[in-house]
Each structure stands twice: as C-alpha cells, then as structure tokens.
Amino acid sequence: MSANGSPILEVSDLTAGYDNVPVVRGLSLSAAAGEVVALLGANGAGKTTTLRAISGLVRTSAGSVHLDGIDLDGVSPTGRARAGIAHVPEGRGIFYGLTVGEHFRVGLRPTRGQIDEVLGYFPALTKLQHRRAGLLSGGEQQMLAIACALIQTPKLLLLDELSLGLAPVIVERLLPVVREFATERRVAVVLVEQHVRLGLDIADRAYVLAHGDLMASGSAADLRNDTNRLVASYLGETPALG
C-alpha cells in the first residue's frame, strides 16, 4: 500500500498549542498522494492539535506546514481549504437541520456526476438525500461528513476520530472506504484513530505521539507487528532497542 512521489503534506519541526502553551513540540511528518498516514496516541497526546494546526485552526509557534510544496504560513483556514485541505473534525461538523443533499451544495456547486461519484463510496446515503442530518444514525452522519469533504476534491484529507461513538462493526466498514478513495483518487490522508489496530490495518505509515512528542514512527506493518514498541510509545516511554 505504499505511495510514490513527492509528499503532498510536509510538516517540519511543528510546535503548536493554546494560550502560549505548546501541546505539540518539534513534530515532523509527511503524507504522499494516495497514502494513508495514521496519527496515534493516547488522549491528550496532541493528535487533534496537530490536525488543527495543519488546517490553520490553531496557530503554530514554530515550524512549517507545506501543501504540495507551498508554504502555508499566514494562510487562513479558508485559504487552506481552497488550496486543497479538507478537515473532518471530531464530532463530524455537520448541520443537523440540513438534509443530506443540501450538505453537498453548501458553498459548492457540484455537478450531478460529482455527487454520484462521491455517493459511490457511500451508497447508503443515496436514498437518504432528503433526510435531515439530525435524523441519521451515527454511522450515516460520519459517512455524510466524509462525503462532504470528498466532494471538495481535496489534495489532503484530515480525519479526526472517525470512529468516535460508533460501534466497531461500523468502523470496520468505514475504514476500508478511506483506504479505497485514498488509492483511487490519489488523496493524501492523515487519520487520527482510537482503534489502533483497525487504523494500522488500512494505513501505509504511522506516527505515535505521547504528551506532544513524537515517540515512534514507521510503516504500519512494522508497528502492528511490534506490540512492545507500540505500547511503550503510548506510555510515553522510549521504545527499547533490539
């Protein structure tokens, strides 16, 4: 599941946080077109802050974020979205009073073909286009949130806790779809996922954060097979060598 070519996303020595208190320190990571990168760690590790810094919702105090070779320093969240970053936040970020179909037209004028292409990944939404989002199940709401991101034809998709509040069986259906559209549409994906094994199953590479610091990184297969290293990283310990 490796991806080729130059990185779509390059984060270098990133430090970011809130009220002058750093939550993430000196973080570097990358994601290429067609690649799924998992960002793992316990609660409070800095995963959400990292995504928010990439999309411009949190100011960085040091380091840089480049999208397709362009430095995003000083670019607003709206400008970053226009440049090709789609961010599905924790909690999904949908409008409960709007129908599924209305969501696809918020701020956009997609063609019928574009809508049908996105619905091809989430066929369950096809018959729900006249239903208000507040009446959808949790899994359907998450499908809608991702579909709304995809219809923007992003270069980079940021997914924060896709599985939050969902039954594992629903997550097992959604995550392979993420893998599928990353590969088919050559979208770089950074995925924050609480179900570590499920996330590693679809990812190419992974980074593990603990208390705002990078503790481990490598191929998803290597991390999946090295349980001791993964556990030590979650606990904020330096993985033992050998």
Image (cartoon, grey):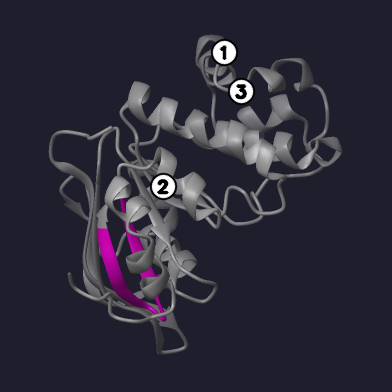
Q: Residues within 10 Å of mark 1 (few under 14, many from 20)?
A: some
* Main secondary-structure element of the magenta-colored stretch: strand
Q: Quadrant of residue 180?
A: top left
Does residue 236 appear anywhere in the picture?
Answer: yes
Q: Reading the chain from its start, which is encountered first: label 2 or label 1?
A: 1
Is residue 64 placed above or below 135 in the rendered structure? below
**What SS does tag 3 mark?**
loop
- Residue at label 2? 200
CA gap, disc 2 and disc 1: 29 Å
Q: Quadrant of residue 217?
A: bottom left
- Residue at label 1? 116
Rendered residue at 72%/53% (across/down): 165
Does residue 72 appear anywhere in the picture?
Answer: no
Q: Reading the chain from its start, which is encountered first: label 3 or label 1?
A: 1
Q: Position of residue 56 (x, y in %)?
A: 40, 62
Q: Residue furthest bottom?
A: 20
Q: Position of residue 142 (x, y in %)?
A: 65, 40
Q: Could you say which is closer to the camera, residue 236 or residue 15?
A: 236
Q: Position of residue 66 (x, y in %)?
A: 21, 55
Is residue 151 placed above or below 188 in the rendered structure? above
